[in-house]
Amino acid sequence: MLTRYTEAELRAEINKQIDQLIQKGNDVHPAWVTTAVCKKHSRGLTFKDGDDGVEPIHVAFWRFCGNAYTRKLATACINDLDKSDDGTAPTEQRFLPGFMYLRPQYVVTRDGVDVMVATEKMTVAELKARAHLFERNSVTLAEHARELHRYAEMRETKAASGE
């Protein structure tokens, strides 16, 4: 009998590891998250068929994903946390007195890998690069919004004229 292991279960394990690292004030590096999650399932690599015919969840884990997929999903989960800002103005200071939008951590690329780093541990260059990214995105998003409005108006005009 096969035991099923799903992406939702893997995401839950990864997010739990990410939360634990953040609570401890550590950087969130995908390799560290991957190692912690995979280590919990290492029994799956040593399974020998038993009498009951039911394989352990750890075997299903390794068959489903393994290290490479866990690493890919860990990176995605870290990046998802960085995109969690809904774009609305905050009503209170979230992190540091005097700063309404500043987050406790951001994703930065270090040695070619996306790593979530506590804001106070980021270099000045990383902070400025993130600020420039937000400035570029705000211009692009505003232009994108104008085009969507223009296109919607064009469609309304065509619908009203019966085209």
Image (cartoon, rainbow, N blue to C red):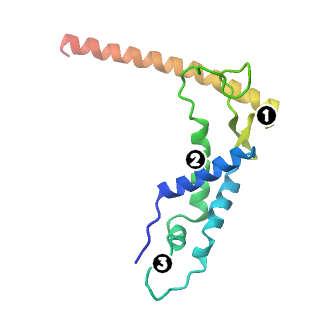
Q: Is residue 133 above or below residue 69?
A: above
Relative to 161, is 60 on the left or the right? right
Residue 120: numbered disc: 1
Amino acid type of disc 2? Ala
> Residue 14: percent from the left, percent from the top?
59, 53
Q: Which residue does the numbered mark 3 point to in the structure image? A: 55
Mark 3 crowdedness (10 Å alpha carbons): few <14, some 14-19, many ≥20: some
In terms of depth relative to the viewer, which is nearer, 131 or 45? 45
Q: In which quarter of the image is residue 83?
A: top right
Mark 2 → mark 3, Cα distance in angstroms: 29 Å
Which mark is nearer the camera, 1 or 2? 1
| Residue 97 in sight in this render | yes
Mark 2 crowdedness (10 Å alpha carbons): few <14, some 14-19, many ≥20: some
Q: Which residue does the numbered mark 2 point to in the structure image? A: 76
Residue located 57% across and 19% down the image:
89
Relative to 120, is 73 on the left or the right? left
Of labels 2 and 3, earlier in sequence is 3
Pick the quarter of the image with the C terminus: top left
- Circles 3 and 1: CB distance less than 8 Å? no
Residue located 68% across and 36% down the image:
106
Say what secondary structure mark 2 lies in: helix
Of labels 3 and 1, earlier in sequence is 3
> Residue 131: percent from the left, percent from the top?
70, 25
| Residue 114 in sight in this render | no
Relative to 89, is 107 on the left or the right? right
